[in-house]
Image: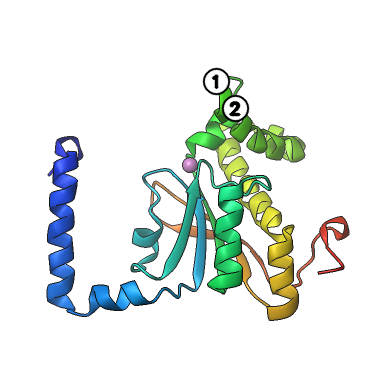
Amino acid sequence: MSPADKTIESLLQHNRVWASERVREDPGYFSRLSSLQTPKFLWIGCSDSRVPANQITGTDPGEIFVHRNVANLVVHTDINLLSVLEYAVTQLKVEHVIVCGHYGCGGVLAAMHRTSFGGVLNKWLRNIKDVFRLHEAELLACPDETARARMLVEFNVREQVLNLAKTSVLQRAWKYEHRPVLHGWVYGLEDGIIKQLVEMQPGDDLHPLYQYDNL
Ligand code: CO
């Protein structure tokens, strides 16, 4: 079935086929999954439909705890992201947190231009404009716009990893449990390959002003 032919009904029909195939292959599949969730990984990715966390990492249901938003941002006032992070770190006790951006990200491209998208989206994209401003000299030194957009995608991922490290939730887990490791990745829409950009181990360097000393 081509993507254009898919309907709400066809999605539900596919779901029934998928569920019965799982049970045929492994009768205990759903009873096992429904009783236990112990993912080792938290994924913070872009909402873009072309970057599905499970498919591109070969993971099954139960293996990755997922949060996705426009341009994979870690915003300190985003109660949704913060709730996911707190639950994953303090309750699920994940060992790794992955921020995965992708080249060709529409959110990042939009933030590089001066088009207004109306109310709330402008405010969201402003976080990426701030990342641009932090790295302006380097970005403006790149004459090619496509290459510059790729650079901003990478700077954005690095910045969001730093934003994770600035949270007290993360710092407390680092201090008392020596986990999780933070990873910044970029996915290529053109080739399906994930590139590792940055990794932060518990206790790695963070600007001292962001380090809480009474956790
Ligand atoms: Co995107």
Secondary element under disc 1, as helix, strand or loop, is loop
- Residue 156 visible within the image: yes
For this orientation, the residue located farthest to the front is: 35
* Snapshot colouring: rainbow
Q: Is residue 91 left or right of residue 213?
A: left
**Can you identify the residue that label 1 sits on?**
118
Nearer to us in this view, 142 or 215: 215
Q: Amino acid at mark 2?
A: Asn
Measuring 45% from the left and 75% from the top, which residue is drawn there? 38
* Residue 52, position as x, y percentages in the image: 38, 53
Measuring 56% from the left and 64% from the top, which residue is drawn there? 87
Measuring 71% from the left and 60% from the top, which residue is drawn there? 165
Report the quarter where the N terminus lies: top left
Residues under labels 1 and 2: Cα distance?
6 Å
Q: Is residue 165 left or right of residue 105?
A: right
Circles 1, 2 touching at the beta carbon (< 8 Å):
yes
Q: Quadrant of residue 86?
A: bottom right
* Residue 173, position as x, y percentages in the image: 69, 72
* Residue 187, position as x, y percentages in the image: 47, 53
Measuring 40% from the left and 50% from the top, which residue is drawn there? 51
**Can you identify the residue that label 2 sits on?**
122
Secondary element under disc 2, as helix, strand or loop, is helix
Q: Amino acid at mark 1?
A: Gly
